[in-house]
Amino acid sequence: MSEFRIGVRDLAAFCHRSGDIDHRFTPSPTGEQGVEGHQRIYRRRPASYRREYAVSLRHSFEGVELLLQGRADGYDPEQGLVEEIKTCRVEAASIPAHVSQLHLAQARLYAAIIAADAEAPELTVRLTWLNIDSDEEAQLEQRYSAAELADFLELTLQRFSTWLHTLDTLRRQRDESLATLAFPHGEFRPGQRDIAELTYKCIDRGGQLLVEAPTGIGKTAAVLYPALKALGRGKHDALVFVTFRTVGRRAAQDCLHYMREHGLAAGSLSLTAKEAICLSPGSACHGDDCPFARGYYDRLPAALQEAVGSGVLDSERMRAIGESHQVCPYQLAEDLLPWMDIVVADAHYVYSLNAGVGQRFAADGRRWSALVDEAHNLPERARDMYSARLLKADLMRARRTAPAALKRPLDALNRAMLALGKEQWAQPDWDSREQLPERLLNSMGDFVAAVGAALADDARFAPRNPEPMEFFFAVLQWLRVAEQWDVDYRFELARGEGSQGLALTLNCLSPARLLAAAHTRSHALVAFSATLSPQHWTREALGLDPSAVSRRLDSPFAAQQLKVEVETGIDTRYQQRAASLPALAARILAWWRDVPGNCIVYFPAYRYLLDCLAQMRVADPALAGRHLWQQTPGQSAADRQALFELFDERRDVAALCILGGVYGEGIDLPGELLSSVVIVGVGLPQVGREREQLRAWYEARGEDGFDFAYRYPGMQRVAQALGRVVRDSSDHGRALLVDPRYGQAEWRALLPPWWEYSAPPY
């Protein structure tokens, strides 16, 4: 008999939600504020009141068993009371009836299960709204007999039964197809079987795996295939393929498409940013303003039915389903999450402070595995997601167009910022502190509450007030980050030009603690990349458990396939760049003349790129006969595609790019599309106050601050750029590394060991 798990909350939403999408009653409190609000309520309840009361129910349908699980916020057996608590930042009277009725339905389901277990003849169901800003409670109470509650539960389960049988049919088809699914493209390539076996064992046991394998080995298929096989054998209940760039998402989608074409009977969902998938740009996200939000939940069942049987649900397919059923495709993806077992998502959806993927799966009790592609990107991305910045200039810009109701809280927030600016700083233009400013946080909370009230009162408030809303979201992020405050954070103040130049930053020095907490939500974690060395640094940066398995696989390619020359006679360090520029320009021009085929030259900084290009034009106006392409700031996807088309059409392209940028990793240019790369410098991150804070943080912990903050991240960029040339067993190419440090053992040791390197001259 098949078994499905679902949370009481998701069951209530599926069966009892109706009407419009309506986000006017956000902002909801942050996670910490919600917990604190629940604690306030609990302190007011009698000793007989049981908090977070766990309930579960097994219900058998025709050949399918449903496990229903959840936690009622409160149950008082002496009073015969079941309570559902909701925290908010608006007046309870402004919350629409259909929203309250949905939450009441959730509470009635808890009560029905409790009444059956406790053999209670009747129970009172209470829905309590707590305004966390005013501390006011509003309650809705109804008394139900055990028979009424049982009837409501039975009605709910009957509504769900048709959908459950659809899911059961799809799962059976999925498992049957997975039993015979062959590895994509036939035989395993060298190294792929090792990755597949390690991945399967990790998921089977439930744990963490770090795999470093050369670029071009086929890691996406080698990880996805065993994860799917494990899904069919019940080793886990869902998998999330985590990406950082569009190219990574497309690689996963292409692999799933290929397997669909070769027998896989399973659907997958790719989560897409709201801005990229919206069918009504400029509209507010509620039924009064957007036709795709109006009546959304009434049309949702038919849209869900089509979506779950549609194979690979990428952004184009989701938009098509949204248009067909007149539903918001972004919200549709959110509502599909509880029913999908294969998800492709940017790291934001899994690891940000308001991420929902892991929480949704965990709420249902599903064991899900995270497959993190290009995992070397996660620490820096997480550091950014777990930090926040607030600018006084943005506050004043928001105030200029803000309605009267927001001016007072904005003025209070401005005064709090001004007070910080008048305090004594460690330096005239910068300061770093280890305590949070309470006055500032309180002012932010008041501003957020005021925006919440405005959103509830005015259906068009958000689209009519873009600048106050933009500042509002920045404040929300600040408050979320402030909740994570610990020894691995610093509160930084910077004074820019003019009276509005003040900037306040919550700087996450190390995301390891928060990443470790996020990892605990998953059943298994597989982090893989071509550049995860040195692994002791990567393990710490990723927040991995001490028991995590680490592997570095040998290259399947011959060392002679990439011949790497080392030029140690040209000093690219910042202070020496001007003096060495003529020699660098001459060396690159000589490379273009001597090494045929398309070439990418990577520079550590855009200014350096421009200076070198100017010097090369002086030395050789014809630029060695090359067709030049240059990366510029703010290039679009179309601009990037133009470069790839050039590589496809010509064999004399010289592309000047930034090391560590969008062209430094994740691009696939096999065969003659790319013949060589030149890497100028060792890729060190730019020296600055934030980076120096990170260096000091590591040194205080007994680590080598320069290695952890500069050397290792820089050489990771170098290794990624080297990996652009050889993509398969038939590829051959060349590379040139330009910097004296490549002649030093501590730097050479960090280069990929599987290529030939020319001995530096001594």
Image: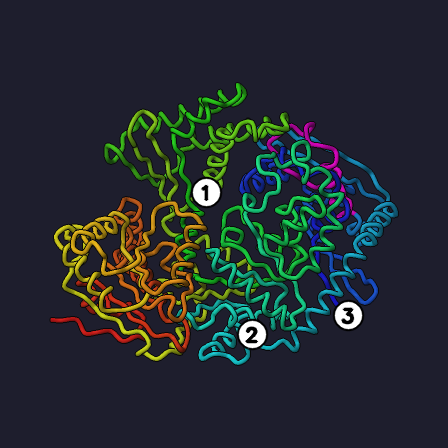
- Read off the residue under disc 3: 1
Q: Residue at x 63, y 25 (%)?
A: 457
The mark that comes first in sequence, 2 or 1, is 2
How far across and down, in percent of the image, does residue 635 sit? 39, 47
Reading the image, the residue beneath label 1 is: 481
Q: Amino acid at mark 1?
A: Val
Q: Which label lies toward us, 3 or 2? A: 2
Horizontal arrangement in the rendering, residue 363 relative to residue 477 (left or right): right
Question: Could you say where residue 126 lies in the image, as x and y percent from the top left?
Answer: 74, 38
Res. 367 visible in picture: no
Local packing at callout 1 (Cα closer than 10 Å; few below 14, some 14-19, many 20+) is many
Q: CA distance from mark 1 to mark 3?
A: 45 Å
**Where does residue 166 sit, x and y in percent of width and height?**
76, 61
Secondary structure of the residue carrying tag 1 is: helix
Image quadrant for the N terminus? bottom right
Q: Which residue is mark 2?
A: 184
